[in-house]
Image (cartoon, rainbow, N blue to C red):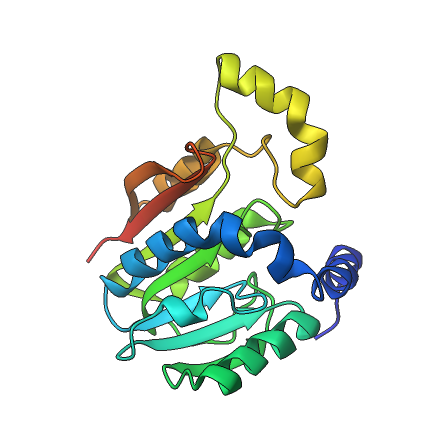
């Protein structure tokens, strides 16, 4: 599979981030990541974690889960595999280099698909969401943990001012939850069933999108 120019640039960026990723993100993202894991496992044991990165959330899953992780970055995945080996995380069934817009899994394979802190970074987020929906069983859920920009008001104005800083650490306030909601409506078979604020102070949000049975 040949990378396009954007994908190649992202691979290089993740290679630079990989050595320091855990130091920057671990404690900041842990509450939201745990919430996403709990919501995903509530749908059933077989979970795809899209954009698994260095595997920060792999230890949050219960032992009965069956977790498949994919990421664009081989450098990130090496660190994730090291965590699996060191901690004996037998619930992690595979870690693979894969583009989330072109998943190499069959239809209706997973009880849930979770994507944590990546959907606003994917060059084609709707394509990724459609792939998540494809590999999801009927009745299963896409679980997103992410920063979504406020649609309006004083918080939105503050986000606009802070956008250069937010962008530098990998998030975009320009990406609104309404974009995902619009995608769900357009599919005709996905329903947003929850959107709730998470730590810190609602900066991150949990979104659950259910595939109609």
Q: Is residue 147 left or right of residue 72?
A: left
Which quadrant would the C terminus be assigned to in this image? bottom left
Indicate the position of residue 63 as horizontal and vertical percent values.
Answer: 29, 79
* x and y, in percent, of residue 68 in the image: 44, 76
Question: Quick one: which residue is furthest to the left in this view?
Answer: 213
Up the image or down, 5 lies above or below 152; here it is below
* Quarter residue 11 falls in: bottom right
Q: Is residue 185 above or below residue 7?
A: above
**Residue 209 located left or right of residue 26:** left
Using residue 211 as the reference point, say whether residue 82 is left or right of it.
right
Along the line of sight, which residue is nearer the eye, 9 or 67?
67
In the displayed structure, 200 sits above or below 159; it is below
- Residue drawn at (39%, 75%), measured in percent from left and top? 67
Q: Nearer the viewer, residue 130 or 19?
A: 19
Please give the name of the residue rendered at 44% of the width and 40% of the height, measured from the top-left corner.
180
- Residue at 51 percent of width and 12 percent of height: 154
Closer to us: 23 or 176: 23
41 and 57: which is toward the camera = 57
Q: Quick one: quadrant of the N terminus? A: bottom right
Q: How many marks?
A: 0
Provide residue 29's location: percent of width, then percent of height.
49, 50
């Amino acid at each position: 599979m040949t990378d396009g120019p954007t994908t190649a640039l992202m691979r290089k960026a993740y290679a630079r981030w990989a050595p320091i990723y855990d130091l920057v993100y671990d404690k900041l993202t842990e509450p939201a990541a745990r919430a996403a894991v709990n919501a995903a496992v509530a749908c059933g044991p077989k979970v795809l974690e899209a954009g698994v990165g260095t595997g920060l959330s792999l230890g949050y899953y219960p032992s009965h889960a069956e977790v498949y992780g994919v990421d664009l970055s081989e450098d990130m995945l090496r660190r994730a595999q090291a965590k699996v080996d060191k901690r004996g995380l037998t619930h992690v069934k595979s870690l693979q280099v894969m583009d989330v817009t072109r998943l190499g899994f069959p239809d209706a394979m997973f009880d849930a698909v979770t994507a944590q802190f990546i959907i606003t970074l994917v060059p084609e987020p709707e394509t990724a969401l459609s792939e998540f929906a494809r590999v999801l069983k009927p009745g299963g859920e896409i679980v997103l943990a992410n920063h979504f920009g406020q649609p309006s008001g004083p918080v939105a104005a503050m986000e606009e001012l802070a956008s250069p800083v937010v962008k530098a650490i990998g998030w975009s306030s320009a990406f609104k939850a309404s974009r995902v909601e619009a995608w769900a409506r357009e599919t005709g078979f996905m329903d947003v069933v929850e959107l709730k604020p998470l730590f810190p102070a609602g900066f991150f949000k949990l979104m659950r999108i259910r595939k109609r049975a």
